Image: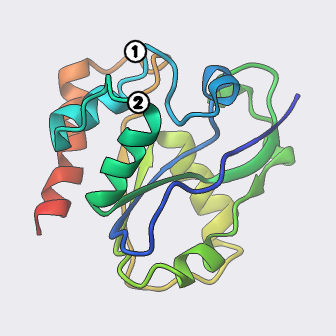
């Protein structure tokens, strides 16, 4: 099935951009980033930035943006048979237009990848095809998806602390 990502959840003063690969089925159905109840993204942000995971979705996005953090996905569209990154048909990938977005974000310095597929897709389909500013710093984080069960929650959260560290500087 052909799936499409959401528009970026960002403001012009964002210093950090968190990128997933492509929203899963639940997120697409609800039109919300990280909507699956077992996804650790919002619980991690509650711990890191005191953004209550129980707040309405639009409030969480606004609070995140106020912190200088934006959300988007690497992929604009792709064919995916299920909900997992492993179900994405590599030859169907169309990346989002990061060159245009980043040109509108003068304070952007850091890009964090929520999972290996986001990082791999960015390197393969964005860095090789779009001209991006050389000052950007990239960070790989473990996926917050419930499918990423090989890494313990506390170990994932420890790695996600990098996000808070960057925001403190």
Q: Secondary structure at mark 2?
A: loop
User: Along the line of sight, which residue is nearer the eye, 58 or 98?
Assistant: 58
Q: Residue at x 35, y 80 (%)?
A: 107
Q: Residue 89 falls in which quadrant of the image?
A: top right
Q: Which residue is mark 1?
A: 149
Question: Which class describes the residues within 10 Å of circle 2: few (<14), some (14-19), or many (20+)?
Answer: few
Seen from the viewer's position, the closer of residues 56 and 83 is 56
Q: Secondary structure at mark 1?
A: loop
Q: Is residue 164 left or right of residue 145?
A: left
Q: In the figure, 166 relative to 137: above or below?
A: above
- Tell me if residue 161 comes above or below residue 129 in the rendering: above
Residue identified by numbered label 2: 56
Q: Is residue 91 left or right of residue 122?
A: right
| Cα gap from disc 1 to disc 2, whole angstroms | 27 Å
Q: At which x and y percent is residue 28?
A: 68, 29
**Along the line of sight, which residue is nearer the eye, 9 or 2?**
9
**Which part of the image, by quadrant, shows the C terminus?**
bottom left
């Amino acid at each position: 099935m052909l799936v499409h990502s959401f528009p970026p959840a960002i403001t012009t003063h964002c210093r950090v951009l968190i990128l997933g690969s492509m929203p899963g089925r639940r997120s697409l159905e609800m039109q919300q980033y990280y909507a699956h109840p077992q996804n650790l993204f919002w619980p991690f942000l509650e711990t890191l930035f005191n953004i209550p995971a129980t707040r309405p979705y639009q409030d969480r996005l606004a609070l995140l943006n106020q912190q200088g953090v934006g959300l988007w996905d690497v992929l604009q569209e792709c064919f995916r048979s299920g909900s997992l990154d492993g179900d994405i048909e590599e030859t169907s990938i169309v990346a989002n237009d990061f060159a245009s977005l980043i040109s509108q974000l003068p304070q952007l310095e850091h890009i964090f990848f929520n999972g290996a597929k986001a990082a791999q897709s960015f390197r393969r389909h964005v860095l090789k095809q779009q001209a991006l500013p050389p000052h950007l710093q990239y960070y790989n984080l473990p996926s917050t998806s419930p499918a990423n069960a090989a890494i313990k929650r506390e170990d994932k959260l420890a790695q996600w602390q990098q996000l808070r560290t960057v925001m403190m500087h």
